[in-house]
Amino acid sequence: MLENKFNKIVSVEDAMKHITDGITLMISGFGGVGASYRLCKEIEEKDVKDLTIISIDAGDPNLGPDHIISSDGKCTKLITSHIGATRGAMTRYLEGELEVEFVSQGILAERIRVGGMGIAGFLSDIGIDTLYADGKPTVEIDGKTYLIEKALHADVAIIFAQKADEYGNLVYSKTACGLNPHMARAADFTIVDTKEIVPFGDIDPQTIITPGAYVDNIVKGGGDWKWAWE
């Protein structure tokens, strides 16, 4: 029998208590794939403001973080690779209501990864001599100039898994894995939405991608995106 202290399953209402004004929030998924539709819906409906959101994109229309980022005052800063697919995010950005830090996808992924590894940052020559490099610190090594890319951290990450056990060991489905493992490590508090919850010990250790040590809350959700916004 798993001890209660290792059982991290909570209600959605309890998980949402950790979403508060002004936090930095990582949201997994790319074009809606690998995102938690249920938790995004809950955040959209919660009275919360001034969020800084870190996400590969702003979602697709009506998918993933779109509703959160498009809501007035709910998200005030977005760190992402692109926002062009969502009219709400683009409109807010062009009207000066949303601060956006654009980062190429590979650099964004690595900034999140090193954030979860306890590394302050890394060196990259991507974007040297372009607008992207303006204001970024640089360092010279062996006669070559590199940008210093700082690690990214979050107060809370909401991620999506195909399967979880009670302790939070996670299995993902194919490309839906995405940045979920990186975000789970780079946040102080990780909330997992999963399609299936099984008893501790039922997942083959060789298939676990995110160990339960990086997970704080588990909610049973999953399902199709249309269900979340019906």
Image: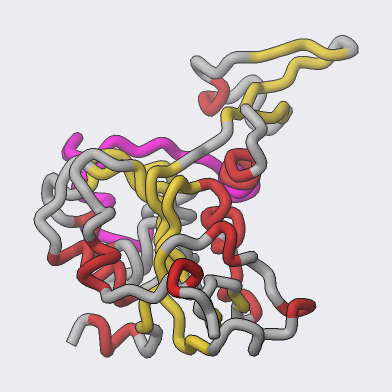
Name the residue at 22% across, 58% down. 17
Q: How is the image coloured?
A: secondary structure
Q: How many marks?
A: 0
On the rendered structure, is 84 left or right of 122? Answer: left
* Depth order, front residue of 87/18: 18
Answer with left or right where residue 211 lies relative to residue 141.
left
Answer with the quarter of the image where residue 84 lies: bottom left
Quick one: which residue is furthest to the right in this view?
Answer: 142
Q: Please state the horizontal and vertical placement of residue 107, each as a whole percent of the image.
A: 62, 42
| Residue 94 seen by the camera | no
Relative depth, front residue between 169 and 85: 169
| Residue 205 shown left or right of residue 169 in the figure | right
Coordinates of residue 19 in the picture (x, y in percent): 25, 53
**Vertical order, 133 against 69 (above or below):** above
Asked if the magenta segment contains residue 106, the reply would be yes
Residue at the spot x=52%, y=38% of the render? Answer: 152
Which region of the structure is painted magenta? 84-109
Residue 73 image-quadrant placement: top left
Q: Could you say which is closer to the camera, residue 126 or residue 14?
A: 14
Q: Is residue 135 visible?
A: yes
Residue at 33% from the left image edge and 83% from the top image edge: 225
In the rendered image, which quarter contains the N terminus? bottom right
180 displayed left or right of 36: right
Based on the picture, tell me whether residue 151 belongs to the magenta stretch: no
Nearer to the camera, 189 or 173 = 189
Q: Is residue 18 above or below residue 131?
A: below
Is the C terminus in the top left, top right, bottom left or bottom right quadrant? bottom left
Q: Position of residue 71 (x, y in %)?
A: 15, 55
- Residue drawn at x 56%, y 75% is 176
Percent x, y for residue 132? 53, 28
